[in-house]
Image (cartoon, grey):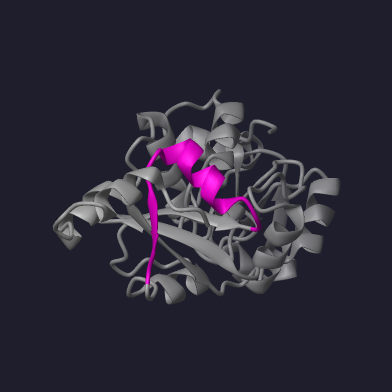
Amino acid sequence: MTQDPLLTGLAALAAEPPESLLDRIAARWVRVPAPIGELTVAYTDHGIAYVHAGDGFTQAFRERFGRPLLPAARPPAGLLPALRTGRLSGLRLDLRGLSDFQRAVLEATRAIPRGEVRPYSWIAARIGSPRAVRAVGTALGRNPVPLLIPCHRVTRSDGAVGDYVFGTTAKERLLLAEGVDLNRLRGLAGERVFYLASDTTGVVCFPTCHNARRITPAHRHGFRSVAQARAAGYRPCRTCRPAEDIPA
């Protein structure tokens, strides 16, 4: 990793720059293990700013953030368990520079529980822009902190997993590790079933909702849309909050 000219200039000062000044100017970086292999993570005094897989980290970071980089001696406290579980547990994120729309998309994505998925249209509806499905996909593709904000849990309405910043294979690997039955989802989608309802509770859910997973076969009913389920007398689950599906 080449030395940044700004840091070279600071090093040439007669007095060593204070650590607090460096942290305001530069980002720290560290390589860490993760469920999909080694990642390079950059963080600032505001929190984790960037998670990168593969080569080209330095160039990608500088093009996107315009900050110099310094190696860190160790990862920030809480980073490794957060990468494994997706639970931040107090770990801060530095999302400065994102638009209000991008922030809203990422905040909605953080609400998806481990082991569950939601369609892009759910994110769009949740942030009050139900027609902005493509824009949601673009925002997720620019997620600077994948795994920490679990954009791998957002999938296509047709049963396909969809694109991912680290590639489709990595996305499938992460979802399978969390217990998502991708074959079942594809099978349901092939039957045009995107929601599951229970005739004992009168509730309709997304198929991966923990409430839907408890429905026994004898009491399970599939629907193409929430409107169809409502017409049959079912009400949307208050946990997974299904919305009308708009194909991604």
Residue 93 is drawn in which quadrant?
Answer: bottom left
Q: Residue 190: percent from the left, percent from the top? A: 85, 47
Q: Nearer the viewer, residue 215 or 106?
A: 106
Q: Is residue 24 left or right of residue 31?
A: left
Q: Residue at x 66, y 37 (%)?
A: 228
Residue range in magenta is: 54-72
Instruction: Name the quadrant of the C terminus.
Output: top right
Vertical comparison of 132 with 242: above or below: above
42 vs 248, left or right, is: left
What x and y, as percent, mark residue 179?
65, 72
Residue at the (60%, 63%) spot, across then down? 212
Residue furthest out toward the top: 131
Is residue 17 something that shows in the picture? yes
Task: Look at 65% across and 58% down and name the residue there.
Answer: 54
As rendered, which of 49 and 199 lies closer to the eye?
A: 49
- List x then y, in percent, for residue 65: 41, 40
Judge from the rendering whether residue 103 lies leftward or rightward of residue 23; answer left or right: right
User: Is 76 situated above or below 185?
Assistant: below
Q: Position of residue 178 (x, y in %)?
A: 62, 71
Q: Is residue 55 magenta?
A: yes
Asked if 132 appears above or below 174 in the picture, the reply is above
Q: Is residue 243 visible?
A: no
Q: Is residue 83 magenta?
A: no
